[in-house]
Amino acid sequence: MTHEANPFATRFTRPGRLAAVDVDGRPIDLDAVLERLDRIGGRGAILGPHGSGKSTLLAHLREATTARGRTVRDVRLRSWRDAPAAVAAVTRVPRGGLVCLDGWECLGPVAHWVIRTWAWLRGSRLVVTCHRVTWLPVLVRCRPSPAVLEALVRQLPGSADWLGDSLTTADIRAAFDRHGGDLREALFDLYDRMEERRRPTADGRT
């Protein structure tokens, strides 16, 4: 290993640090996603199971929208108590701006209706993440696969040096299978595996 820090540390893998990829491991065209958002009325949902890359894609859409000179407001939803913060975000963003709500399923149907309606009345774009179909058009479906996990691993610091040596493709697939396709948990798993393989042996080698 040529890097002291574990390449699977959170600072390298948190949402927004790695490029969003599709089910085949290819980079997602963010401009195309934003164009689709406009075509479906400016409001849409990123669907997918836990750890499938929804938050990562949302983070990149925020950056891409900001780069276009548009205002963005984002709220991480943890319970129904965050509904006022979501409404406030829609209120504060100017017409044509983007509101990103991560964790849409935490809110109930009444809050969903209020936020959707308020965004429509104000002319705000709205993108949410959720686990199942909601009363919003589907913008992107995140589908985890071993190819997605491998593509993410190849983006990590120094992967050309340690991939295939300290960590193999078989290790990546095994982590994916152990966690039922949850990419986040698989990356945590690979962090632990990398730590184990970097520990000095009895003769002082790693």
Image: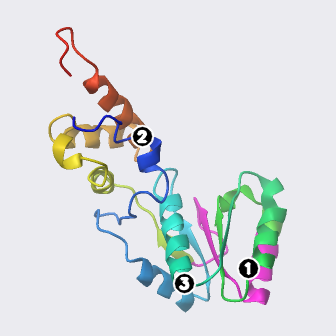
Question: In whole angstroms, how far apart are the C-alphas of marks 1 and 3?
Answer: 17 Å
Give the residue displayed 33% in from the left and 69% down from the top.
Answer: 27
Amino acid type of disc 2? Ala
Task: Based on the picture, tell me whether residue 171 belongs to the magenta stretch.
Answer: no
Residue 64's x, y, as percent? 49, 76
Q: Nearer the viewer, residue 134 or 140?
A: 140
Quarter of the view holding residue 90: bottom right
Amino acid type of disc 1? Val
Question: Eyeballing the image, is 122 above or below 100?
Answer: below
Label 2, secondary structure: give it: loop
Q: Nearer the viewer, residue 132 or 25?
A: 25
Question: Eyeballing the image, is 118 above or below 142?
Answer: below
Label 3, secondary structure: give it: helix
Provide the residue designation for mark 3.
37
Q: Which residues are magenta?
A: 112-137
Residue 18's x, y, as percent? 39, 58
**Which one is closest to the eye, mark 2 or mark 3?**
2
Provide the residue designation for mark 1.
93
Q: What's the coloring here?
A: rainbow
